[in-house]
Image: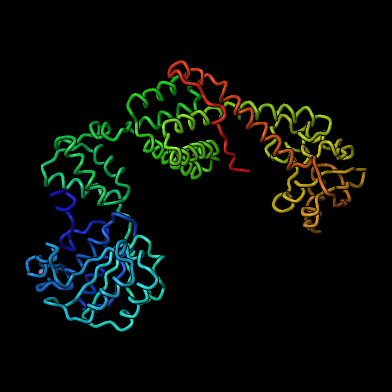
Amino acid sequence: MTLATKYRPKSFSEVIGQDHAVVALRNIIKNQKIHNGYIFSGTRGIGKTSLARLFAKALNCHQYDLDNGDVCNNCPSCIDIQNNSHLDLIEIDAASNSKVEEMRELLDSVQFSPSNGKYKIYLIDEVHMLSKNAWNAMLKTLEEPPEHVVFLMATTESDKIPKTIISRCLQFNLKIVSDNSIAENIKNIFKKENISFDDGAIDLLVELAGGSIRDSITLADQAAFQCNNNITEAEMSKFHGLIDKSSVDKLLSDISENNVENIINELKRFYDLDTNYQILFERVLAELHKQIIQEMLKGNDPQDAHLYHQFFNSGFNESQISGRAREAFEISVLKCLSFRDSRKNSTEEIKDDSKKKSEDQSIEHSKKTKSKIPEKSEENIEIEESKQTNEEKKLDPKLWFETFESLDIVGPTRTHFANLEIKGSSDNKVIFIGEKMFAKRIKENNISELKKSLENAGFGNLDIEIEEIDKVIDTPSNNWKKKRKEQIEDFQKEIINSSLIKNLQENYDKTLNKEKLIIIDHEE
Ligand SMILES: [Zn+2]
């Protein structure tokens, strides 16, 4: 007998991780308020049919223990249900019985009294698979059910059950079983079976089970067999192609420290160990997810972790489609590395660039005042500068992009004007041009917000005019797109020319197919 069969709960007290449903079911039996329909919904492997079967047992038990709220497991009814031979418990898998004729045939038998139990119970698994006509047949029965009939329905997709049915049933939404409950349950089973284990092995089983109590026991059974009843994390890892958890932390810290040589060695080691890359992906993603939340709680901007998460996530999705998980994983790592380098360089370039351009226009200066944390030594000079520039500053149409970035406008005003170009400006007036779809959306309050912001930046009190035009080119929005495209192209070049690829070529004797290096820009 498999462990899963042996340790399927035989009484309410043995049910793991569904306390709220068990309490409710016990109350139903205690108060004898029996409905005709019950729905047990929730994800796979959390014990929906086990609980439904237990409830069926409780309904027909001859010696139900009201004090402890549990079945006796001794009476003929309990024993028959345990042996799958009870005449009044009819189990149907809707996945194979969704046809209306079969459902009708089944429902025809509803009128007959139970043969030896109190209730005639229909347990329908995967009930969401029933056809429309089958539902209608069932609805008729539920509208005027004989008192002795109970429908127990189990489903992973309760949203597919017609509302007319749901409204006539009691629904139990079963929860994902907590990692702790799964761990405790496996440990108990191992102790009863005289199987030895280490803590790491339990953690691994919990991780692999992903909230499914059924999977956890099946995997435990498998592990006991593979490890000859002495289950260790090391042995299990070998069978599942798992690297130890600290490797994920190490890989991520190597990425953020740009430790190319270490990374190459690690990737090679993963390959040599015949790693399960799907689980490796999942672990990296889980770790990054954790880091993002931690950084946000600390009030930091988790920009890097966010991007790494995007890279690994798209790699994971691609690997699901292509089936080439190792390739996808290594490329994800490369993307993270190259991103670090390219971003470091390009932000430096942008800084240099805008400094040069803005020196004449003192835009850099207005940026500094906006940031509100002037360094003390520069304070006096800045005040002098701003006195001078307050009168002198002119809005140069060619520098609209740089000027725009220094303005303190936000929200819709920012969005609208980012799509406009400056046609011309004079001492007291600036004329914008924009495509109709943007220009027509600009309201009086957007204009006054821009006016105020221009004034704050030292451009004086300017009148603003907006003209509609078919096509604009030199808008801040187009500039961003252009810059981003260039950065991504640079970044692609860097991947191809990186020492990492060269090392990969040397170590694995493989080259990177440039056509296949597709960079997905999620902002486009
Ligand atoms: Zn009994």
Total marks drawn?
0
Residue 257: x percent and y percent? 49, 25
Task: Name which quarter of the figure residue 244 lies in.
Answer: top left
Residue 204: x percent and y percent? 28, 39
The residue sitting at the right extreme is 427
Tell me the residue at 81%/59% (across/down): 444
Position of 105 relative to 478 (above/below): below
Q: Is residue 66 visible?
A: no
The residue sitting at the front extreme is 101
Q: Is residue 423 visible?
A: yes
The residue nearer to you, when weighing 140 against 306, is 140
Q: Is 443 placed left or right of 185 in the picture?
A: right
The quadrant the C terminus occupies is top right
Residue 79: x percent and y percent? 9, 65
Tell me the residue at 85%/39% (across/down): 397
Position of 274 relative to 82 (above/below): above
The residue nearer to you, when weighing 39 against 28, is 39
Position of 249 relative to 509 (above/below): below
Q: Is 319 placed left or right of 221 in the picture?
A: right
Q: Is 253 placed left or right of 168 in the picture?
A: right
Tell me the residue at 41%/25% (across/down): 267
Task: Name which quarter of the figure residue 117 lies in.
Answer: bottom left
Tell me the residue at 37%/76% (across/down): 136
Q: Is 210 placed left or right of 81 in the picture?
A: right
Task: Name which quarter of the figure residue 125 lies in.
Answer: bottom left
* Quarter of the displayed picture in which ligand 1 can be seen: bottom left
Residue 491: x percent and y percent? 60, 28
